[in-house]
Image (tube, grey):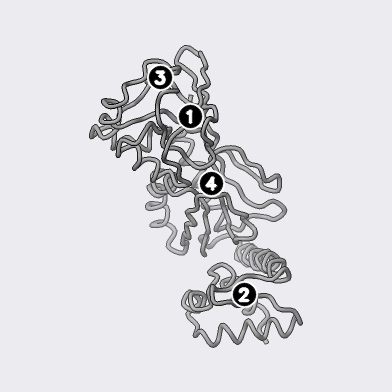
């Protein structure tokens, strides 16, 4: 019985949440993957996965075993690299969690040349709108914008991003153009979920002055792309990263509101679970993020 294969198969089933997808990724048949999982559960004497019409989910024992399986497989990868004298190029799959807008606009352009020079590496981008548990989801690296609330994570600072107000010309023609932050109380906003109606928005002016105004609106979403589309449709003001809307501003679909005023910059960090060494494949991607971020003007908020 190949215990290593059992770990590898179980890890992939957990990561995909689907035996069929895991079988495809592992170049195995679906019955073979099911059989291996069954043999593993029989050997351990506990169920690891709960089967339902909606898919697979781990039992408490399965979630704990998955963490250990990841640790063991990563340690084995590092041991093999050390035995080769670190001569070989990093290989394998690196799973990255990030919001879609930042990953697609900033990170993706960095990855093309990098992957071309590292043919053995692959990237699995998990583009989620909500913060996820990196260990539970089997994520190698997270890119977080804003405060990090999980103390178990190790963080490497990549930079800071600005946020400013934008609106469609049609909206401003209808509702008027704010001249001062106090004027914002009369305007609708397209808001990200988490910005509750009436919640204060603090802006800092070019002379260092600060103003806090309540925000309200009829469009709320957990996805920044929806906020952007809402602003383009003339449904209200939107707080967006200036680099994200360069195309819309260049074509006149959006214009800056209260130029020179910015919301408090938000820190951007690469994060990963503490308590274990980073595999070479993950370290290689982290090094890329740090190198490129240092030269990225969009990550240099004032």
* In the image, residue 63 above or below residue 193: below
* In the image, residue 290 above or below residue 298: below
Report the Cα–Cα distance between label 4 and label 3.
27 Å
Q: Residue furthest right?
A: 45
Q: Nearer the viewer, mark 4 or mark 3?
A: 3
Residue count near mark 1 (Cα–Cα under 10 Å), binned few <14, some 14–19, many ≥20: many
Residue that badge 2 annotates? 10
Nearest to N terminus: mark 1 or mark 2:
2
Q: Secondary structure at mark 3?
A: loop
Which residue is located at x 67 percent, y 55 percent?
277
Specify the label residue 174 is tagged with: none
* In the image, residue 256 above or below residue 277: above
Q: Are marks 1 and 3 in contact (CB under 8 Å)?
A: no
Residue 15 rendering spot, x and y as whole percentages? 56, 67
Q: Nearer the viewer, mark 1 or mark 2?
A: 1
Residue 46 rendering spot, x and y as whole percentages? 74, 79
Q: Secondary structure at mark 1?
A: loop
Q: Nearer the viewer, mark 1 or mark 3?
A: 1
The image quadrant that residue 149 belongs to is top right
Specify the label residue 260 is tagged with: 3
Q: Are marks 1 and 4 in contact (CB under 8 Å)?
A: no
Residue 213 rendering spot, x and y as whole percentages? 50, 22
Report the Cα–Cα distance between label 1 and label 3.
19 Å
Specify the label residue 143 is tagged with: 4
Report the Cα–Cα distance between label 1 and label 2.
47 Å
Comparing 10 with 281, the one in front is 10
Tell me if 187 is positioned left or right of 169 in this view: right
């Amino acid at each position: 019985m190949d215990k290593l294969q059992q770990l590898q198969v179980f890890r992939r089933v957990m990561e995909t949440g689907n035996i069929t997808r895991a079988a495809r990724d592992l170049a195995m048949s679906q019955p073979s993957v099911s059989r291996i999982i069954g043999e593993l559960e029989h050997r351990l004497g506990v169920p690891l996965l709960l089967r339902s019409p909606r898919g697979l989910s781990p039992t408490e024992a399965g979630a704990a075993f998955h963490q250990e399986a990841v640790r063991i497989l990563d340690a084995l990868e590092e041991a093999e690299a050390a035995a080769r004298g670190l001569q070989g190029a990093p290989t394998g799959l690196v799973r990255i969690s990030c919001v879609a807008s930042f990953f697609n606009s900033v990170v993706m352009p960095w990855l093309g040349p990098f992957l071309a020079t590292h043919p053995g590496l692959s990237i699995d981008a998990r583009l989620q709108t909500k913060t996820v548990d990196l260990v539970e989801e089997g994520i190698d690296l997270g890119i977080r914008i804003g405060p990090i609330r999980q103390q178990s994570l190790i963080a490497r600072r990549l930079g800071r991003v600005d946020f400013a107000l934008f609106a469609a010309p049609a909206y401003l023609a209808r509702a008027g153009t704010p001249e001062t932050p106090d004027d914002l109380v009369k305007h609708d906003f397209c808001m990200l979920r988490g910005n509750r109606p009436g919640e204060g928005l603090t802006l800092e002016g070019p002379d260092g002055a600060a103003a806090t105004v309540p925000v309200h609106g009829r469009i709320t979403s957990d996805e920044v792309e929806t906020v952007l589309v809402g602003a383009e449709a003339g449904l209200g003001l939107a707080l967006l990263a200036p680099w994200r809307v360069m195309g819309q501003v260049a074509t006149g679909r959006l214009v800056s509101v209260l130029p020179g005023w910015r919301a408090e910059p938000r820190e951007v960090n690469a994060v990963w679970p503490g308590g274990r060494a980073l595999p070479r494949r993950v370290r290689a991607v982290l090094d890329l993020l740090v190198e490129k971020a240092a030269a990225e003007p969009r990550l240099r908020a004032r």
